[in-house]
Amino acid sequence: MGEGKQKAKAVRKRWIIIFTAALCISICSGCQNTPEDTIVRQKKSDNIKKYESNGDGAKGSQEGKKDGQGAESAEEKEAPKVLEAPGHYKNTASYEDGALVIDTDAEVIVPEGDRMNTYKVAAAEMDQELINKITEAFFPGAEIYDGHNYFQWTKEQYQKDLTMLKKYKAEGNLDPFDNGVYDDTGEPVFDIDLAIADDEENMEHAPDTVEKVKVTPSFGLEWTDESGEKQIDEGRFEGVAETSHGAYSYMVQDSDSHTADVRVLIQKVTEDTTNFRMSTHWTEGRYFIDSEHESAEEGKQPTLSEDAILGLMDVPYEEAEKTAKEEIEKLGWDWELTDWDYALLKSIHVNPTKDNLRDIGYIFYFNRLLDGIPVTFTESYGGALKDMDSTLIPWSYERCEVIVGDDGIQKIEIYNPYKVEGIEMENVKLMDFDSIMKIYEQMMEISNANMLEYSNSYTVHIKRIQLGYTRIYDPTVDSTTGVMVPVWDFFGGSDSENQEYMDKNSGEHSKQSFLTVNAVDGTIIDRGLGY
């Protein structure tokens, strides 16, 4: 990542992300104490103990069709729904003299099945057994090396890089890695003179040769830093696996005193992903396909259409999906593919166009199934803190993402695998759809009203309403145990405009939930916090 100045400039070039963050803040504030006449009950730690069960029988299931003899036909029988709801919901509500508009034109997704339960879950311990399982699933038979010295440069490599940089400078190419320029000065983000000075200094201390060191993935491995000091990776492993499909960086991070999160990151070693001068990262296509931005400072920003992305794609979707599924199936966990998007490898400092993308592929999202019903994927990681002074230990959601490109797996990222410890409440009683929608309509006004502090007009477009599961927890009690509960999520985009800028996002491909409502008791769940 770049220095603070570079980050600030990059952020100004991504208004979409700014307003996504602002919206998350607004939703958080909307989850605080609401007006006295609100129909939404406030969350309390003992609410879950008050959940009611429908009993052993399936409730509200659809009646099967009958054949000509009056008996139910197996071929014609429809799978029962956990809840009766329309297939589509449409409504437009206007507030503040039309400055705030909630435009709902959404598909309603209700999972098949005759019941939903609540489940106890706990954080899976990132121990040696789990590390071995992940290693055997993704790198069977691979040679794995210590990652600290794998990419260390020799004197020869520094000299080669130094010669190349000086050549670029002599030719007047001050931005050879397409990192972009600062908005106010027009100067390249990449400082070629500083890079040359760094090469000259580092070359004095660089070794003549670097030996790769074979290791077994585990915590507590010892390594030597550039100064010759011995270091020990407690709660962390960094390695490189050499496979028949190429080399992959392989990192495992355990929880610590600041977070309950654990993480596994696997990424293909390529020039684009390992050259620290390029400052690239993978991002999702939805942030650009559905969006338009124009500002007085930057003018109208270029957009990237879905047709343009598909025109650059070298791998068919079906092939990429098959590759991702086969890889995750090796873990043997109850995860299924539930969503996907386009994956774009780009410089962090520039908006993507069809001419500046480094690589392209598909990103697949895998989620846990509970009795055949999936945990709903949203772009929120959860595990945020209410404020910077909080001393609570946050715990983000379970998450699994796989990026596949034209030469196979590019990246696998796994956060916080759960252990499902059993059903807490069987066949839990859900609120009816109309009651949920009354809560939605009131809370969308409350949670988005403060956006008018930043915009003259603000419109939310809700395109998808989905019933599924999410995990909640109480960090004041325990940051490693929680409950999977049924929730309604409302996905979409937003338009925001004032004298200085205009942002539009249709929400057609959105994974952003503007509101999450507990389907059992109607309380509001803050997706950012995870409860």
Image (cartoon, rainbow, N blue to C red):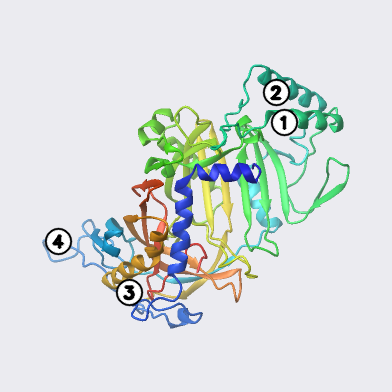
Q: Answer with mark 1 or mark 4, whichever residue precedes in sequence.
A: 4
Q: Are marks 2 and 1 in contact (CB under 8 Å)?
A: yes
Q: Secondary structure at mark 1?
A: helix
Q: Which residue is mark 4?
A: 67
Dot placed on the residue nearer the N-terminal end, 2 or 1: 2
**Relative to 10, does residue 43 appear above or below in the rendering?**
below
Q: Residue at x 67, y 51 (%)?
A: 252
Horizontal and vertical percent for residue 237?
72, 49
Crowd band around label 1 with a 10 angstrom C-alpha radius: few (<14), some (14–19), many (20+): some
Q: Earlier in the sequence, mark 4 or mark 2?
A: 4
Mark 2–mark 3 Cα distance, whole angstroms, equals: 64 Å
x and y percentages locating residue 333 in the rendered image: 53, 55
Locate residue 421: give its quadrant. Answer: bottom right
**Residue sitting nearer the eye, 75 or 234:** 234
Which mark sits nearer the N-terminus, 4 or 3? Answer: 4
The quarter of the image holding the N terminus is: top right
Are the residues at dot 2 and dot 3 in contact (C-beta closer than 8 Å)? no
CA distance for labels 3 and 1: 61 Å
Report the side of 224 relative to 242 (left or right).
Answer: right
Q: Residues within 10 Å of mark 2 (few under 14, many from 20)?
A: many
Q: For the residue labelled by badge 4, is the local secondary structure a helix, a strand or a loop?
A: loop
Name the element at disc 3: loop
Query: Looking at the image, is mark 2 or mark 3 nearer the viewer?
Result: 2
User: How far apart in space, not on screen, are marks 4 and 2 (Cα)?
Assistant: 78 Å
Query: Tag 2, which secondary structure?
Result: helix
The residue located at (36%, 80%) in the rendering is: 55
Foreground label between 3 and 1: 1
Residue at image mark 1: 195
**Amino acid tagged 4:** Asp
Q: Is residue 70 visible?
A: yes
Disc nearest the viewer among 4 and 3: 3
Earlier residue among tags 3 and 1: 1
